[in-house]
Image (cartoon, rainbow, N blue to C red):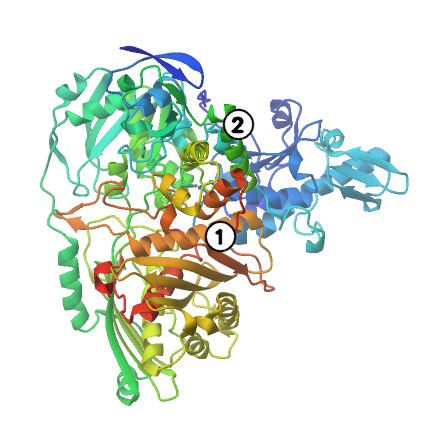
């Protein structure tokens, strides 16, 4: 895609009435006339919808597309209520314009819950305007008109008018109130709930340019940026002349940078006519890095310190219900165990990149980002620009998983482009990406639990050792006081201790949950075993008989969880697992996160060598009453499960001498085809508002697998990734 | 140095250093951006192209080693009946999530089906072992290969 910098946002002139946040969708301004003229004959009904005279409907997709399918599923909501044929819909990715589009972020599996109502209303308002325009032309009451896909019908007079013919008549109409505009009865849906292929599929399968890395601008140069292996270390010296002597290299320069690990860090930039030339220049830099206070930190030292902290009293109490010591003393069986999980990297398939063009005080950015507006704010601050002088085009992202919520690479590109005096595409190497991530933080849990003679959990104690400084916990390294089974065990104490960290951390798909589910659901399994109970029955007992338990942010619908747990037991043939061959076993786990209730069963076979093969995974999911796009939804759930499996089997980032040891897919393996099991998914429909799917399917799969390993071998996995050497026959 | 390459049936001239990997010659010099960069060390398959019909990692192949061999990229693979069928199966089953790995997956799958028109599961595992899908769309990739080869998609 060769693009021309425009220097300004296309929609700048639109008058917009509402403030940022989801609510603004109800306050959008009706089509400015200029907008209608600009788009060659197509009339804009609002910021999201344009209709051309042939009836082709263009819908803006507001959120970043990172593979979660949002560029298809959000426009489906609008198209449904607008009442148009999906074949006639074209989708355009919106630029980052929060004043027009509200929150534009790919994170937290929040797009469906936040937009489910409001975007349907956007479509319904546009439909009502079509009806008004027709009624005015026909001089009949709007209430007598109906619609069928793409047209307004007046039965009484046997007249029809296509949306294409009506769109031009809408400009002067009063806008219906979005809050009261009628919505369809779900039984009349023609688009929502139907499996729709991703809108970009034809471009994906033919290799058409879509991604950030594919952006090409006239006169564009290519850049690479080298940062210190030890996070934040400064450049002591670099042989810039040697790099500049490489053919094709235009410029090499040191960037002073700052100390914020999420911002512009010190480093050396090489700008060249091609990326390969920039890389060759990079190899000549011979950079010496200054000493840095965190250069001696290591994973091994963190583990030693965690053990010391774990043996002492917690620095802070997060929760203290009942009397845990007394309950443990009175329990018929007690279990004590220490669990640990490592740092892991996001490793999205498309390495970080960003294209930036700076001209006349204005910055234009093309970025694969999950969080464009944060990038804008950081660039504005660093370069001393006004936010409104920064245009951000959101490209498709080759995966995100939370990595692209951070905007470090955007800030780097902006800085380098300004220094280079030309449009620049900054592309990180895979090694840069692996060694400069915002890692899923590792963590340590020291647990004690007790069960009574009837098989009830009577005591639960967790001393969580995490990273931070006193009460300030590192990003995504916190645990809530309501973490299950808190609220379900009368005597429950959760304590926390922290140790300082000089490694950037951040959210990774189902943050917190992706590690905590492993710990909690494994230890629950240990207690079930101690009680001699069936792991499913034991969990059902633990979940009790109530409906809602607790209040936000710890509100937990135990009834919905029991529903998916029973469903997955049935679906997986749990009751018949006694007939499985030796060294084959089934494990179960459940977890609530991102408003979704998920229970999962894994069947594994452990070879005598210790190698774990996951034979099959079963998932029962409750995300409410409607799956917006069943095709994308199923893909997300299956992908999340296999992603979790990849983490369980392989993924580990090790810190040594203050830096990340792993470099590329050779020493940071990701799961491949032969290891990917079939994943059976069942959506349990309940009458709750629809919620997100990208994240909550992941957490339970890891303990389901490790619990299955226990069933198959009698060996308990208490540390990730799974170490096959512990599982030899 | 000027190299004449045969890409998707066209003779194209690229003026690049001899050690430039084919991937970067295609992407940055010739503007053929379908092949993707994922690792640069031949470990992920995102950059897969066909060289005389064989799936190769273009990130580790210097342009000077290509000569006049027939290079086919994702942009050109639809010109082949098998490639077209594979692309259609990918579309029908809505395989992609982010889609970044899929050009490479489609190139590997097409090379497999040209060599083995009805591959077994084990054939698929082997032929696709060089291609990572970080979004883990493996279930649908397998099903799409089965579909393109006229086999049952059930696993
Ligand atoms: S980029 Fe070539 S194999 Fe990964
Ligand atoms: S679809 Fe995202 S890496 Fe394969």
Q: Position of residue A247 (x, y in %)?
A: 21, 15
Would residue A200 be found to the left or right of residue A350 on screen? right
At label 1, counting other C-alpha atoms closer than 10 Å, the crowd grade (few under 14, some 14-19, many 20 or more) is few
Q: Earlier in the sequence, mark 2 or mark 1?
A: 2
Label 2 belongs to which residue?
B81
Can residue A672 be seen from the camera position used here? Answer: yes
| A219 lies above or below A122 | above
Label 2 in the same subunit as label 1: yes
Which of the labelled discs sits on residue B155, or is there none? 1
Residue depicted at x 19% and y 43%: A231
Query: Are there few (<14), some (14-19), or many (20+) residues within 10 Å of tag 2?
Result: few
Image quarter for residue A173? top right
- The quarter of the rendering in which ligand 2 is drawn is top left
> In the rendered view of the protein, which quadrant contains the C terminus of chain A?
bottom left
User: Nearest the camera: A338 or A14?
Assistant: A338
- The answer for which chain carries disc 2 is B
Residue A220, relative to residue A467: is it above or below?
above
Which mark identifies residue A276? none
Residue at figure coordinates x 49%, y 33% from the top left = A205
In the picture provided, is A163 more to the left or to the right than B58?
right
Query: Is residue A171 or residue A204 the one in the foreground?
Result: A204
């Amino acid at each position: 895609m060769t693009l021309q910098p425009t220097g300004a946002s296309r929609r700048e002139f639109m008058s917009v009435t509402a403030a940022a946040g989801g609510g603004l969708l109800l306050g959008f301004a009706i089509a400015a006339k200029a907008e209608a003229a600009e788009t060659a004959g197509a009339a804009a009904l609002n910021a999201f919808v344009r209709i051309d005279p042939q009836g082709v409907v263009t819908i803006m997709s507001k959120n970043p597309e990172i593979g979660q399918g949002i560029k298809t599923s959000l426009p489906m909501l609008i198209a449904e209520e607008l009442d148009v044929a999906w074949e006639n819909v074209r989708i355009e990715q919106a630029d980052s314009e929060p004043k027009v589009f509200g929150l534009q972020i790919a994170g937290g599996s929040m797009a469906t819950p936040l937009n489910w109502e409001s975007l349907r209303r956007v479509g319904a308002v546009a439909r009502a305007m079509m009806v008004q325009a027709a009624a005015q032309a026909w001089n009949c009451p709007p209430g007598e008109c109906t619609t069928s896909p793409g047209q307004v019908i007046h039965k009484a007079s046997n007249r029809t008018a296509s949306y294409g013919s009506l769109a031009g008549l809408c400009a002067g109409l009063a806008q219906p109130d979005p809050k009261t505009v009628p919505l369809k009865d779900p039984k009349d849906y023609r688009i929502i709930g139907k499996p729709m292929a991703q809108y970009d599929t034809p471009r994906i399968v033919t290799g058409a340019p879509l991604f950030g890395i594919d952006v090409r601008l006239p006169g564009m140069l290519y850049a690479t940026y080298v940062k210190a292996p030890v996070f934040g270390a400064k450049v002591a010296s670099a042989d810039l002349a040697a790099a500049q002597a490489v053919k094709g290299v235009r410029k090499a320069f040191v960037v002073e940078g700052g100390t914020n690990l999420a911002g512009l860090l010190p480093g050396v930039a090489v700008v060249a006519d091609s990326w390969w030339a920039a890389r060759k220049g990079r190899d000549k830099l011979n950079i010496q890095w200054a000493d840095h206070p965190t250069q001696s930190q290591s994973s091994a030292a963190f583990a030693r310190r965690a053990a010391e902290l774990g043996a002492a009293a917690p620095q802070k109490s997060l929760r203290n219900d009942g009397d845990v010591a007394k309950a443990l003393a009175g329990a018929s069986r007690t279990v004590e165990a220490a669990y640990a999980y490592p740092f892991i990297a996001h490793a999205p398939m498309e390495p970080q990149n960003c294209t930036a063009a700076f001209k006349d005080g204005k910055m234009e950015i093309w970025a694969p980002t999950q969080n464009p507006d944060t990038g804008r704010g950081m660039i504005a601050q660093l370069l001393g620009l006004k936010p409104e002088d920064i245009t951000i085009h959101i490209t498709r992202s080759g995966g995100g998983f939370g990595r692209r919520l951070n905007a470090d690479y955007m800030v780097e590109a902006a800085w380098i482009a300004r220094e280079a005096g030309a449009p620049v595409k900054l592309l990180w190497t895979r090694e840069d990406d692996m060694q400069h991530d915002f890692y899923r933080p590792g963590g340590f849990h020291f647990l004690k639990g007790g069960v009574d003679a009837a098989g009830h959990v009577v005591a639960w104690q967790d001393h969580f050792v995490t990273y931070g400084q006193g009460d300030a916990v590192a990003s995504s390294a916190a645990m809530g006081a309501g973490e299950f089974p808190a609220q379900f065990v009368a005597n429950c104490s959760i304590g926390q201790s922290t140790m300082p960290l000089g490694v950037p951390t951040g959210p990774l798909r189902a943050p917190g949950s992706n590690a905590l589910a492993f710990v909690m659901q494994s230890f629950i399994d240990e207690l079930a075993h101690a009680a001699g109970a069936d792991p499913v029955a034991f969990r059902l007992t633990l979940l009790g008989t109530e409906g809602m338990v607790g209040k936000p942010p710890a509100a937990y619908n135990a009834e919905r969880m029991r529903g998916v747990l029973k469903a997955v037991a049935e679906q997986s043939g749990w009751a018949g697992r006694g007939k499985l061959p030796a060294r084959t076993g089934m494990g179960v786990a459940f977890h609530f996160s991102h408003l979704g209730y998920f229970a999962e069963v894994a069947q594994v076979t452990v070879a005598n060598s210790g190698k774990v093969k996951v034979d099959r995974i079963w998932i029962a999911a409750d995300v409410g009453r409607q799956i917006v796009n069943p095709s994308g939804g199923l893909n997300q759930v299956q992908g999340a499960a296999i992603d979790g499996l990849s983490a369980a089997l392989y993924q580990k980032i090790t810190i040594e001498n203050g830096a990340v040891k792993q470099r590329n897919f050779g020493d940071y393996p990701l799961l491949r085809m032969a290891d990917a099991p079939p994943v059976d998914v069942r959506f349990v429909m309940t009458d709750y508002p629809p919620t997100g799917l990208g994240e909550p399917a992941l957490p339970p799969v890891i303990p389901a697998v490790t619990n299955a390993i226990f069933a198959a071998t009698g060996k308990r996995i208490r540390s990730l990734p799974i170490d096959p050497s512990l599982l030899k026959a | 140095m000027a190299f004449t390459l045969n890409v998707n049936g066209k003779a194209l001239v690229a003026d690049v250093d001899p050690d430039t990997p084919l991937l970067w010659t295609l992407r940055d010099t010739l503007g053929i951006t379908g092949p993707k960069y994922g690792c640069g060390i031949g470990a992920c398959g995102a950059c897969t192209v066909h060289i005389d019909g064989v799936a190769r990692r273009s990130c580790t192949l210097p342009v000077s080693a290509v000569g006049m061999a027939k290079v086919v990229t994702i942009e050109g693979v639809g010109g082949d009946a098998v490639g077209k069928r594979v692309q259609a199966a990918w579309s029908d089953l809505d395989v992609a999530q982010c889609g970044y790995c899929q050009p490479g997956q489609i190139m590997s799958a097409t090379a497999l089906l040209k060599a083995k028109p009805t591959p077994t599961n084990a054939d698929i595992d082997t032929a696709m072992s060089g291609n990572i899908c970080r979004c883990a769309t493996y279930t649908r990739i397998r099903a799409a290969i089965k579909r393109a080869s006229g086999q049952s998609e059930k696993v």
